[in-house]
Amino acid sequence: MRFSSLPAARHRPAALFAGMWACALCVWVPLYLRNMYLDLVHAKFDLLAGFVGLGAIGLAACFALRPRAFALQPGRLSASILCAPLLCGCYLAAWAMSDNRWTALWGLNGRRAGLALFALCTAAYLIVRLFCPGEAWPALTVLLTAAGALAAALGWLNFWMLDPLGSYYCTLPGTGDLYLSTLGNLNFFAGFLCLCFPSALRCVFTARSRAGRGLAGAAGAVILSGLIIANTDTAWVALGAMLALLCCDRRLTAAQLGLVSRMGAGVCAAALATGLALAGGATSRVVLRTGSALLTRPPVALAGLAVTLAVAAVCAARTFAPWRLFRPLGIAAVALLAVGFALPSLFGVSLGPLNGAFWLKSGWGSSRWDVWGVLWQQYRELPPLQKLFGVGADGVNALLNPRHTTTLIVLTGEVFDSAHNEYLQHLVCGGALGAACWVAFLVWHILQGMRARPFAALTLAGYGALALFSITSPMLLPLCFVAAAFAAMPPVPPQKGAWACFAPGLLLLFPALVLANQVETLTL
């Protein structure tokens, strides 16, 4: 099946309602702009809870009015559907053993990465997977493309000291350089753009007119250009993972590779213009560093522009299978990366100016390596039962502080309350079983999606790469679960099946009832 082919599905009243809910859930909603970051994270969590409740009520109403509308296709129920509920089950067991059940349920203030978040995402995943029609995915990709382009455009305005929404400079004096657009912290901003990029690709590849293809391509270029000002190398790693998966796929054609190259040329042109403007004395809100600083150097941007335009010209002139070229290159790149990390880290061989990127030692990854070492040691000291089920969601802060606060300040110069690695975070907070369920959830749905909905699989691959250096939050996790739900949908329309399988995800919220009487006395 080519990237441009789309499966047909049969419309049903309940499925259409769930599809509308799924689209609304993932669209960029600029709420609570008056108090950014902490309030925005809470607003996203509340928005997720509201939509899950709305979806559940709507499905119940549709079932009461038209029970036959809940007939599902065979294939919607498969073994992969168990990963998310099992992940929640691990966190539920960890909540029962946790010393701080309030944090284990709701998460830290400004994070909201507790059991409630995983339960809501699981409910969203099950509702979308079981009831949402396949036609909702194309509509969702269009909405995400527009949302990503708008967020990136607003980010560029903020970068050049223009604040039309009045969200940062008046409310966050002296710290506004950490925030662009309406996604909060720069890491969330970059992550959202990465997850929107596959949707832009789908819109470009499936456009039926030249004007539509050009508009979608321009939106994709704007989304990618936002990574320049996002100022985080994690986003470039995620983009590289998605492009590698795309270019190694047999279904990618030379013409489609040319379209991707044109978007890359647009990004290089934006980097060149940014570099020249900064060299000319223009004032920016954020000081570019590392990968973004390198890309905006005029010689580097010019070289990238020349290469991307050359690739686009070759793809327009010739017909070939890109995967035959990129698969060997991908294998060679992985081998070089492995050697690059092994030589300095295991054998002490210096790589000169590349040591900072490849030598795994104290200070690597903005001091993440030091935090990971402390957390790994802490995990090894846990009792056997907690090694299996974890210490409870968002429990890393209790392990690190205050016991290791002084040590981390000496090593890193700052205090950490998160692993900044979602896999390690799941291992510590959800135990070995929770980490296994999370990895199985991502890998299984990526493999399923590559067969039926490759752009949903690319979104999950991007999130998997981001998770190596990021933290769990309501800003991005719901989109990951919704993309997984679409990735698991079969390419053929469903017929009949069970309809109430989303109930386990909702039942996992029962600890909220246990703590409801403490709301007045407990604070986040």
Image (cartoon, rainbow, N blue to C red):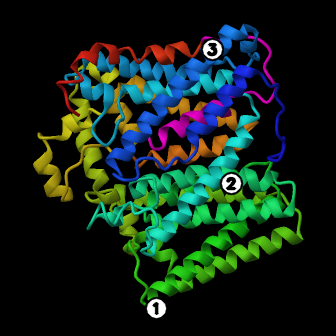
Q: Name the front one of labels 1 and 3.
A: 3
Determine the image quadrant of residue 329: bottom right
Give the residue at mark 2: 200
Task: Assign a secondary structure to mark 1.
Answer: loop
Q: Is residue 245 visible?
A: no
Q: Earlier in the sequence, mark 1 or mark 2?
A: 2
Main SS, magenta residues: loop
Spatial CA span between label 1 and label 3: 61 Å
Residue type at numbered disc 1: Gly
Q: Which residues are magenta?
A: 472-500
Residue type at numbered disc 2: Ala
Residue type at numbered disc 3: Ala
* Residue 293 x/y as whole percent: 44, 75
Residue located 47% across and 19% down the image: 86
Task: Assign a secondary structure to mark 2.
Answer: helix
122 in the magenta segment: no
Residue located 57% across and 67% down the image: 225
Local packing at callout 1 (Cα closer than 10 Å; few below 14, some 14-19, many 20+) is few
* Residue 322 x/y as whole percent: 78, 58
- Against 322, is 263 above or below? below
Q: Is residue 217 visible?
A: yes
* Residue 433 x/y as whole percent: 41, 23
Give the residue at mark 1: 280
Question: In the visual, does 252 lie left or right of 446?
Answer: right
Spatial CA span between label 3 and label 2: 34 Å
Question: In the visual, does 428 lie left or right of 455?
Answer: left
Local packing at callout 2 (Cα closer than 10 Å; few below 14, some 14-19, many 20+) is many
Position of the C terminus, as image quadrant, is: top left
- Against 306, is 243 above or below? above
